[in-house]
Amino acid sequence: MKQRSLIAKMVLLPCSKLYGGVTYMRNKFFDWKVLKEVGFDVPVITVGNIAVGGTGKTPHVEYLVGAFRRNRKVAVLSRGYRRNTKGFIIAGRTSTPRDIGDESYQIYHKFKGEVTVAVCEDRVFGIRELMRLDPGLEMIILDDAFQHRYVKPAVSIVITEYNHPLSEDRMLPYGRLREPARGINRADIVIVAKCPAGMTPWDYRSVINDYNLFPSQHLFFSHYAYQPLQPVFPDVATSVPYLDWLSSGDSILAVAGIGNPRPFVRHLKSFGAKVKVDIFADHHQYNKKDIEYLLERYKSLKGKQRIIVTTEKDAVRLAANPYFPHELKAVSYYLPIQVEFENPGGEQPLETVIEKALSNSSVIKV
């Protein structure tokens, strides 16, 4: 194992250095104005990360939408990762995860179509289309766009994971970083997500010292608050169990195809039931063979109560899956999550910081 690790390091580390050099020069070209950023009359907020993997961008985008849609007309634009379409598409009642991507589909349905959700590979074109179609827009949130520097944001937000500090990571492909860690200096706001319960003042101070942000930057801490189970198929669900109703004589089949399923699995295992776990790749599109496998796994569960629990992002893919059998629909649930923020240093609420940044924004329109 050590020899294999050494060989991987010898092969991947030079590739990481090369990739780091390329991304460094790309950012420099933007800093030197060789590559041009485009500003817009509508405030644009970018939400992204420095490292690949499940840092929790989508729940934080949903938090922002929920916070600002009461006072502003908001749109969300993403590239629609893993969709089977191309170009600019606005989410509608007939859209599917394959049309617009599972995350955009989830956001559209969570807010019941009350906010505009669109996808486009070219963010500049996508923003212009949104503004053309709805001149009354007052805010556009770009999902997964921190490295998309052709758009000049009014506010840029970077999300990192508590358990994966940037200072301990390396560039792709040896590590998980999309760009050198110092790229975080471009962010107006940094959110350390998925913080554990019971953090001490020393824990907070350790993170603050590790990131060592500029005085103009703002650092926030967030965690997931898991909500009661919801049926994946509401039309066929008879009743919805609470996790704390389950006992050691009951069983859960945990199904997850997200970037970091560990917190999800850990939460399910904190209750009394036996938990079997099936992990798939992030954004996995479940095929007929996968569904047949899940059916067999469910049949192998023991206990009085046997249920399937999946993530919110997986639920939108499973609900639209034509191969999902009726036998499983009545026992399939998803675990919603809600982002909550800590306030160890008396920092103003995130919404207040963003509003102040927008009022002081000097984005140059071109």
Image (cartoon, rainbow, N blue to C red):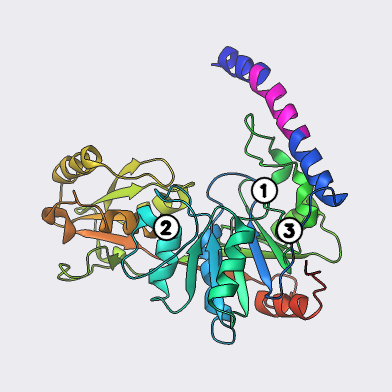
Is residue 198 visible in this depiction of the protein?
Answer: no
Element marked by disc 3: helix
Is 227 situated left or right of 360 in this image? Answer: left
Q: Is 82 situated left or right of 46 in this image?
A: left
Residue 9 in view, yes or no: yes
Q: Nearer the viewer, residue 6 or 132?
A: 132
Q: Is residue 238 magenta?
A: no
Camera-near label (3 vs 1) is 1
Marks 2 and 3 sit apart, C-alpha to C-alpha, by 43 Å
At numbered mark 2, what does the secondary structure look like: helix, strand or loop? helix
| Residue 112 image offset from top left, x and y in percent | 38, 76
Question: On the rendered image, what quadrant is the C terminus found in?
Answer: bottom right
Residue 50 badge: 1
Q: Quadrant of residue 93?
A: bottom left
- The dominant secondary structure in magenta is helix
Secondary element under disc 1, as helix, strand or loop, is: loop
Q: Residue furthest front?
A: 132
- Relative side of 53 to 283, left or right: right
Q: Quadrant of residue 96?
A: bottom left
Q: Write down the residue under mark 3.
A: 202
Amino acid type at circle 2 is Ile
